[in-house]
């Protein structure tokens, strides 16, 4: 039906398309009997209600996480968070990030080194959040250039975002750091800290940077509690992230189901 409307619309581009009423009223549409229309309408209403339910639940947990991030990490110039787990009362320690974590550069690739197929996938920034094309490499490199399942990675150009890599062995690209933590830091705690602390990716005037250098991130100050408290915080937010991801998958699943039914249940 959309194709019919588009075919009868006027305008140079999709942004300026319009359908005049005299043309609209001449378009023939196929409709079933009223009883079947009612059944179809009820079916899609139930599907829309299910999508809306999962969407509301997803948004609830997303807002809940934001609230916990604000309360479970100390505010600027403070050593204690507003909300803590029982039996933890010590002040948080402040250190330069480079003193407690190591940031390893990824490998810069020439275009002719990126293959359409090969031994190792080459992980680029776009592969995290979009369906960007995957490239491959047959190069054998030092171990520091590979990321394995469970490694903490950080994209540092255009998009500042930490990730726990969940996949097979890859070569990570130049715009990604692999982060190795010392015995003072828990990996999952640092993941949440990097997500929560906007000052890590801001200039001295507070504006967001387009990219951040390794020396800049290493010289940023962070605050952290004992390793045991870090582990509790990291696990808490991991479980919250897993719940958010679950409801996001449910929303996506039902949206795809609706789209499939729309294509099959209408002429």
Image (cartoon, helix red, strand yellow):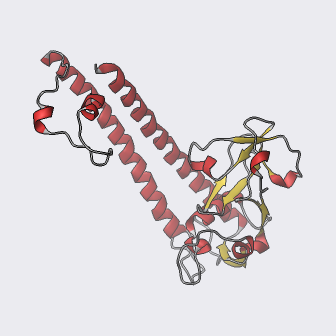
Observer-nearest residue: 257 or 57?
A: 257
Q: Quadrant of the C terminus?
A: top left
Residue 207 x, y percent position in the rendering: 52, 77
Q: Quadrant of the N terminus?
A: top left
Q: Quadrant of residue 175?
A: bottom right
Q: Quadrant of residue 235?
A: bottom right
- On screen, residue 137 versus residue 228, left or right, reads right
Q: How many marks?
A: 0
Q: Quadrant of residue 84?
A: bottom right
- On screen, residue 142 versus residue 83, left or right, reads right
Tell me: residue 170, above or below residue 231.
above
Observer-nearest residue: 123 or 36?
A: 123
Residue 118 x, y percent position in the rendering: 79, 36
Observer-nearest residue: 118 or 147?
A: 118
- On screen, residue 21 versus residue 178, left or right, reads left
- On screen, residue 264 versus residue 138, left or right, reads left
Name the residue: 78% across, 74% down. 99
Q: Is residue 135 visible?
A: yes
Name the residue: 68% across, 50% down. 124
Residue 21 x, y percent position in the rendering: 11, 37
Q: Is residue 84 visible?
A: no
Residue 71 x, y percent position in the rendering: 50, 69
Observer-nearest residue: 200 or 125?
A: 125
């Amino acid at each position: 039906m959309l194709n019919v409307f588009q075919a009868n619309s006027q305008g140079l581009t999709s942004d300026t398309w319009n359908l005049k009423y005299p043309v609209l009223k001449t378009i023939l549409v196929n409709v079933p009997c009223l009883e079947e229309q009612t059944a179809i309408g009820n079916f899609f209403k139930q599907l829309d209600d299910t999508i809306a339910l999962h969407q509301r639940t997803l948004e609830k947990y997303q807002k809940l996480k934001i609230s916990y991030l604000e309360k479970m990490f100390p505010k600027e110039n403070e050593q204690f968070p507003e909300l803590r787990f029982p039996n933890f009362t010590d002040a948080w320690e402040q250190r330069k990030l480079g003193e407690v974590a190591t940031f390893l550069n990824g490998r810069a690739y020439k275009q002719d080194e990126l293959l359409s197929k090969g031994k190792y996938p080459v992980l680029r920034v776009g592969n995290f959040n979009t369906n960007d094309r995957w490239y491959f490499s047959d190069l054998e490199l030092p171990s520091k250039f590979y990321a394995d399942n469970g490694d903490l990675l950080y994209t540092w150009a255009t998009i500042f975002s930490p990730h726990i890599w969940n996949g097979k062995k890859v070569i990570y690209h130049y715009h990604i750091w692999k982060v190795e933590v010392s015995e003072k830091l828990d990996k999952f705690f640092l993941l949440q800290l990097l997500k929560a602390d906007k000052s890590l990716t801001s200039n001295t005037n507070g504006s967001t940077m387009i990219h951040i250098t390794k020396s800049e991130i290493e010289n940023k100050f962070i605050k952290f509690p004992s390793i045991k408290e870090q582990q509790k915080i990291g696990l808490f937010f991991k479980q919250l992230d897993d719940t958010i991801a679950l409801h996001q998958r449910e929303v996506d699943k039902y949206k795809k189901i609706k789209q499939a039914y729309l294509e099959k249940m209408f002429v």
